[in-house]
Image (cartoon, grey):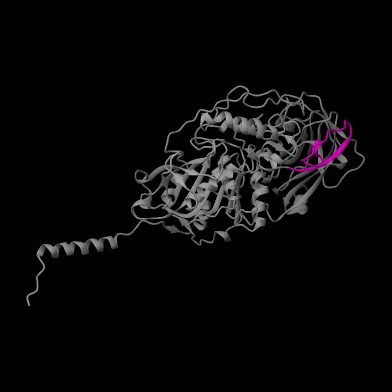
Amino acid sequence: MNKRQPSVSNIFKFLFFLISIVGIAQTPKTTPVFKDGEAQIVEGFNNPDKWIRHDLFVETTFDTDGDGKLDRMHVSVTRPEQTETEDLKLPIILCSSPYYAGTATGAEEGLFWNVKHELGEKAPERSHPEVVRKGKRPIISNSHIKKWVPRGYIVVHTSAPGTGFSQGAPTVGGPNEALAPKAVIDWLCGRAKGYTSPDNNEEVKAFWSTGKVGMTGTSYNGTIPLAAATTGVDGLEAIIPIAPNTSSYHYYRSNGLVRSPGGYLGEDIDVLYDFIHSGDPAKRAYNNKTIRDTELKNGLDRETGDYNEFWAGRDYLNKMGPMKAALLMSHGFNDWNVMSEHSYRIYKAAKEKGLPTQIYYHQNGHGGPPPIKIMNRWFTRYLHGVKNGVENDKKAWIVRENDSPNNPTPYDAYPNPNAFNVTLYLKNGAPKQGKLVLNPLKKQAPETLVDDHNISMEELAQATSSKNRLVFTTPTLTKDIHISGIASITVKIASSKPAANLSVALVSLPWNTTEGTVITDNIITRGWADPQNHKSISKSKPLKPGKFYTMTFNLQPDDQIIKAGQQIGLVIFSSDNQFTILPKPGTELTVDTNATKITLPIVGGQEAYKKAVK
């Protein structure tokens, strides 16, 4: 029987089909590449012209702008083209901020509270600026994109509630600021709904997501990753908060004292609300009335500075129970805006919970991420799942004085495990310098200082003689001293008035005024307190003029090497013109020097100290 022979054209078609199959099989897909435990820049991911960018709106579980509908958060996505063409799924770096869409300029007259008034009195009312929204859809921000997309991540940005095109109201630490990023993470993990616009029902799916999410950001943008982590949301595997505000109370108050963040004298939580409120202008009247003029106004209590239920609800240390994300914390020891205690208190609690933790501290001011190598190892381990041994790395990375931020010194922990408390006592010397000594003295007469906010701490520390402060110094150091941890002061004090500011600073003397001075040359650490809160930061009581009260409080965490040839100086004064309310000069503070002491965490303890002051 004759069989039909295939035609030449059919043979060629079959051959072309085989060649195409082989070609497809031999064309490798673009995937993340890892070397030495770090995600590498991949050429196929490194062409911005081929990145896919789009935006959407994720539905939350709350309605904070009072329109009867669940608020939707504006989200923008930047991902490699391979997530579309090669069915590639990648982990996410999520960044959230109230600043992306514009803020008040900060220059409007009356934006900040007037701080020139007597303690306990109401300040004059301030003005409320209008925020002009900026930015266009679909781009929310370009931050972090060039760093992470080429390394095999998808970067997602979202505006915080009540800012930009995100619906709702800004609450400056309220529950919605944790639930908003949680909703976005739920969407990235397929548990929440995203839509193409704020008011339609056309869904958007995150089909390109592995369901592994990390978060990072600086300042307020670093607070939000922690807020999200405290919800315990599944899928948030790791966070790297940089200089985060972890407690609104610790940002705007200190041991019962009304204290501004450095550089923003007179700022308070309601000021920050006005600063960031860039959302829908049609919703502002309701939001202002509900949040700023009711919730914030009734809770902030600038008269006493006490820690109350309002402040407790904006303290993430109180909410860490559900947290399970790996934590790499970053901060500057000389950040006098968001002070170094903010990171330490959360790092310490996370470590005690048994979470994977590391901390990176540098010697500069506000901001400052860890080196890319440290961040990369963190996200590679917890988002890509590469077992690079990061959990066996050193737990603390400290940038030593004058070193590059990219060259931190590794330590087993922070504070340094070899640091031990050394208590120093006061020896009278006013109005000149007194001494810091190892043994307590008795029968010294109390010493008095007169408050005058017109004189700065820097001037007081340098003055050879002054009635406006007390200064006590160690002998000149013959060897370096390494301070690591939290210094604390116990002070027995009386005031001539029912209320007074109390400020202290630990400094390195003689004061360096030469050109090229760096921030670590002079200031070691600082602290502030309200003597009315000597029993509790939650309950103040007017002082009886002339009566002595004993109060103990911490200074800001630090890790610093004080060089031989210097002296460690303790400065005790009243109003701090960079941070506190500024009453009329004249209040007298009297210190019982027999019952006052400063405790320093010194590497090597008392033995090291004694060797350094011989």
Position above or below: 31 against 179: below
Q: Which residues are magenta?
A: 531-554
The reply to whether residue 2 is visible in this rendering is: yes
Q: x, y (%) of residue 52?
A: 37, 45
Q: x, y (%) of residue 598?
A: 79, 44
Name the outermost residue toward the bottom: 1
Residue 538 on the magenta span: yes
Q: x, y (%) of residue 477?
A: 74, 45
**Would residue 406 be found to the left or right of residue 268 on screen?**
left
Q: x, y (%) of residue 206?
A: 43, 50
Identify the residue at horizontal 7%, vertical 78% (top origin): 1
Position above or below: 167 against 226: above
Quarter assignment of residue 549: top right
Which one is in front, 256 or 510? Answer: 256
Residue 505 on the magenta span: no
The reply to whether residue 362 is visible in this rendering is: no
Which one is in front, 382 or 408? Answer: 382
Name the outermost residue toward the left: 2
Which one is in front, 146 or 80? Answer: 80
Name the outermost residue toward the front: 68
Number of marks in the rendered image: 0
**Would residue 273 be found to the left or right of residue 95 on screen?**
right
Quarter assignment of residue 196: top left
Position above or below: 270 against 125: below
Identify the residue at horizontal 41%, vertical 57% (top origin): 33
